Image: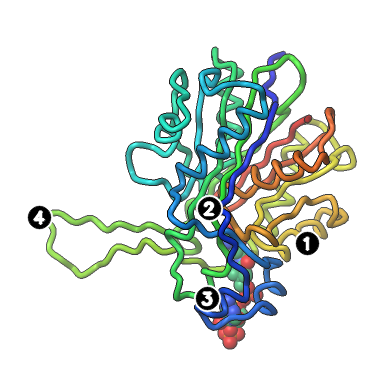
Amino acid sequence: MVYTKIISTGSYAPNNIVTNDDLSKIVETDDQWISSRTGIRERRISLGENTSALAAKAGLDAINNAGLTPMDIDLLIVATTTPDMFTPSTACIVQDIIGAKKAYAFDVSAACSGFIYALSVADKIMRAGEEVNALVIGAETLSRIVNWNDRGTCVLFGDGAGAVVLKKSEEKGIISSVLGSDGTLGRSSLTSGEFVPKNPYIENDNKEDDIYINMDGKEIFRFAVNKIPQAVNEVLAKAETSLDEVKLIFPHQANLRIVDAAAKKLDLPKEKFYVNLNKYGNTSAASIPLALDEANKNGLLQQGDKLVLVGFGGGLTWGSVFLQW
Ligand code: UT7
């Protein structure tokens, strides 16, 4: 049986730390509200680096940690909601920056589920094809699309990037994955980057572009609390594995209350969920690989550990991956 296995992790976040107190100088908010409602205490905000710059640094970190060079990469996927531009893809820009000349490169757009989508797609491509090494990155500069006058959203998000090198393997690695979408809910609950059609043949109806994140927080909260347990149970059922065998769950890092509610629904202690959103806020597609890299570098992951990664977000989308470390 052919598997793919995560052989290394990497990450990068801008060194500009913005605390809740810092934000209270920009919008009407305070540390008490933000930390009690979300668990977030600080986030990193880019001082000019774009998504590709963050992604390239995280990617190189993962490649170095694997003992490989960029020329060893056959497939390069970047999951992002905040590409540098429409084209070229952020993945192609990263390819150029790091010199991964052998790879083919493309982006995946699945909002906060993006890294799970990219990892699962890479796994499926590699098991069916000739690719040996893939670099899978989740990277965001959400500070570019946050409305800094809207206290309901600007306090939630941050910038960062996380990456893994995935290698074809005879040893067990990724065992099962689940991906899902529900487009019926997407445009009413979480949007950003709406560019309205404009050309010389359309009468100006005064509709403006809207690049900002618009979110129905309560709707997404409900969705997440239902989807996390469902996606965890489904991915384990596919692998005929019970929850007891799982050492750690890496959820998308959006809100501590979402994680706590999901843990309760799954009847699991909170400690089974790895959380670092207090330091980074919600970094969308970057949040899961950022957390995975932190846990890995802190020596929390041993060979053979069974892990679940689970994401949810705009689209609406969700997904989970069950793997053996
Ligand atoms: O990555 C996936 C995407 N996003 C998510 O996962 C987010 C999911 N949703 C959430 O995390 C929560 O719904 C939020 C944290 C966004 C909001 O928490 P909430 O408990 O649903 O608060 P709310 O939106 O109902 O707001 C409650 C009050 C409102 O005031 P009133 O109307 O009760 O007087 C808001 O105006 O809190 C006010 N408020 C704030 N106050 C201080 C909203 N934002 C702030 C703020 N500081 N930053």
Between the C-alphas of marks 3 and 1, the distance is: 23 Å
The residue type indicated by label 1 comes to: Asp
Task: Point out the tag, 3 or 1, that comes first from the N-terminus.
Answer: 3
At horizontal 76% and vertical 62% (from top left) the residue drawn is: 261
Q: Does the Cβ of the disc 3 residue fall within 8 Å of ligand 1? A: yes
Residue extending farthest to the bottom is 28
Task: Point out the tag, 3 or 2, that comes first from the N-terminus.
Answer: 3
Instruction: Describe the element under mark 3 as helix, strand or loop.
Output: helix
Task: Point out the tag, 2 or 1, that comes first from the N-terminus.
Answer: 1
* Residue 178 percent location from the top left of the image: 65, 38
Could you tell me how many numbered marks the image carries? 4
Task: Point out the tag, 2 or 4, that comes first from the N-terminus.
Answer: 4
Instruction: Describe the element under mark 2 as helix, strand or loop.
Output: loop
Q: Quadrant of residue 8?
A: top right
Residue indicated by mark 1: 260
Along the horizontal axis of the image, is 290 left or right of 202?
Answer: right
Mark nearer the viewer, 3 or 2: 3
> Looking at the image, can residue 218 be seen?
no
Mark nearer the viewer, 2 or 1: 1
* Residue 286 percent location from the top left of the image: 58, 47
The residue type indicated by label 4 comes to: Pro
Between the C-alphas of marks 1 and 4, the distance is: 52 Å
Residue indicated by mark 4: 200
Instruction: Describe the element under mark 1 as helix, strand or loop.
Output: helix
Residue extending farthest to the left is 200
Task: Point out the tag, 1 or 4, that comes first from the N-terminus.
Answer: 4
Residue indicated by mark 2: 316
* Residue 321 percent location from the top left of the image: 69, 37
How busy is the neighbourhood of tag 3: few (under 14 within 10 Å), some, or many (20 plus)?
A: some
The residue type indicated by label 2 comes to: Leu
Mark nearer the viewer, 3 or 4: 3
Residue indicated by mark 3: 151
